[in-house]
Image (cartoon, rainbow, N blue to C red):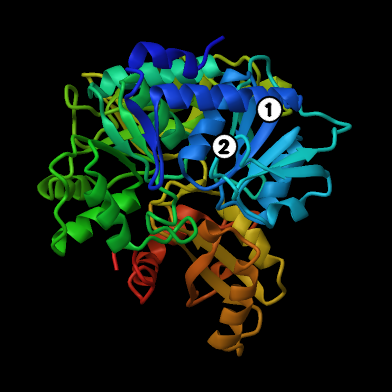
Amino acid sequence: MVNIVTQLEHLYDETQVVVRDTARSLTRGQLTATCQQLAKQLERRNIRTLALHADNGLDWIVIDLACQLANICILPLPTFFSISQLQHALSETPVDAVISDNPAVPDLFPQVKHRETLSEILPGSNHLQLLLMEMSDTPALLPQQTGKITYTSGSTGSPKGVCLSNYQLLEQASVLANAVALKHPRHLCLLPLSTLLENVAGVYTPIMASGEVIAPSLRELGFCGSSSVDASIMTSVISRYQPDSLILTPQLLLLLVNAASKGWQAPSSLRFVAVGGSRVSPALLSQAWQAGIPAYEGYGLSECASVVSLNATRQHRPGSCGKPLPHLGVRIIDDEVVVTGNPMLGYVNEPSSWGNQAIYTGDLGYLDNDGYLFINGRRKNLLISSYGRNINPEWIESEFLAHPVFAEFVVFGDAEPYCVALLTPRQPGISRRQLQAIIDDINRSLPDYARICQWAILPAPLTTDRSLITDNGRPKRSAIQEHYRSLLDSLYHSGVEELSA
């Protein structure tokens, strides 16, 4: 059986620390024993699929590895998902059990038949609840060998579940460890562990390199929701643990660069800082290096088990997303990046997607003569925020256009820290205060990364300029963005508190 726990004996001494959070640490022997004990307890309860909805920490990693050991399919659920997204994920993928640290979660699901704490299985884990669920009349359709189902932040309000095998994840981690080429790295997890990138590259990869994984809670890192961070808290944690490696979104890299400009000293221990999730400004990467942050841009997607290409110390071309990993093939077909070599097993409940050997990414790009990958943008309208959240603007727009006050509502935010909107109200005399109250009300139904933080009324309705709309009345986003560039730029400099503040 392929799993990381069985590899530990070959990678670590018995007393070597493998994982830790701010309260506890586990040596190789302790981690193996704890995972084995938890695996047996989960098997005893006849759990074959399990959803994990919990903050970062040592327990998250133990549960993840124990599921591998017990051959239990695990469904990590981001803590930043809205209630409707959680309910969608568990209705689309019914599970036998849920482990959660949120006391409100059991009341969201009528199918909970029994609950218990995990304190007997994981000492010190009174905050975690094991919820056993009623058997579903319509179990999810999953490809064979599915070991993990990952839901991204969602390109719509109802994101798809990507199915991956444990063998794929282990192979990905092994290849990444060789590409990064750090021996015994000390890695500090800054992204949610439910994010496949941090899960694979931030936990499995350091373990495959006989390293140490440090996983403080997101609260201890200074996060509030998924799109707000206290810079002073995060930088103090980085300084405290003196890591060799980090994984950052562009916005978190900006936070560290701004902190350095205000006097924070990046640890000299840093040897590799991977940056991904959305486009990275070359100027920001240059500033990072000047601040002592060795930032390397990469590219990937869940459908390819996370990382596809990566700059590294031995192969580094600024401005590119690095060279594809050696076990992958990357081609450019009609300007689109197409990946082969380690494709997902398929999507949950979509047998037509199973077994496809090529992943058409929807990203436009090219390979230079030396094999470095460059990404130019999205084929479709999917926005990727600077926090790495996938956002379909049509989804957000539909929520606002459902309200009778809005005649037009167009959302922007690609490579930016938050979403903004240009709008036309149906009532010309309505006040900004009234509009803001309506926007605030609708925002509360959306996850925080999809909320409208700034907005402006269009100087004239889009319908008055046919170059800004299609024949059937849909907005031409690139044309609108170019036409109102200065107005959109002003929305990112109009008083919203930046992450680096």
Residue 299, above or below 485? above
In the image, what residue occupies the spot 25% across and 33% down? 320
Left or right: where 436 falls relative to 268? right
Residue 71, above or below 483? above
Contact (Cβ within 8 Å) of mark 2 with mark 1 = no
Residue tagged 1? 42
* Callout 1: SS: helix
Mark 2 vs mark 1, foreground winner is 2
In which quadrant of the rendered view does residue 264 lie?
bottom left
Residue tagged 2? 122
Disc nearer the start of the sequence (2/1)? 1
Is residue 93 visible from the viewing direction of this image? no
For the residue carrying disc 2, how many other residues have a C-alpha within 10 Å: few (<14), some (14-19), or many (20+)? some
In the image, what residue occupies the spot 58% across and 74% down? 424
Viewer-proximal residue among 460 and 286: 286
Type of amino acid under label 1: Leu
Left or right: where 177 falls relative to 62? left
Residue 234, above or below 166? below
Q: CA distance from mark 2 to mark 1?
A: 12 Å
Viewer-proximal residue among 452 and 105: 105
In which quadrant of the rendered view does residue 15 lie?
top left
In which quadrant of the rendered view does residue 67 lie?
top right
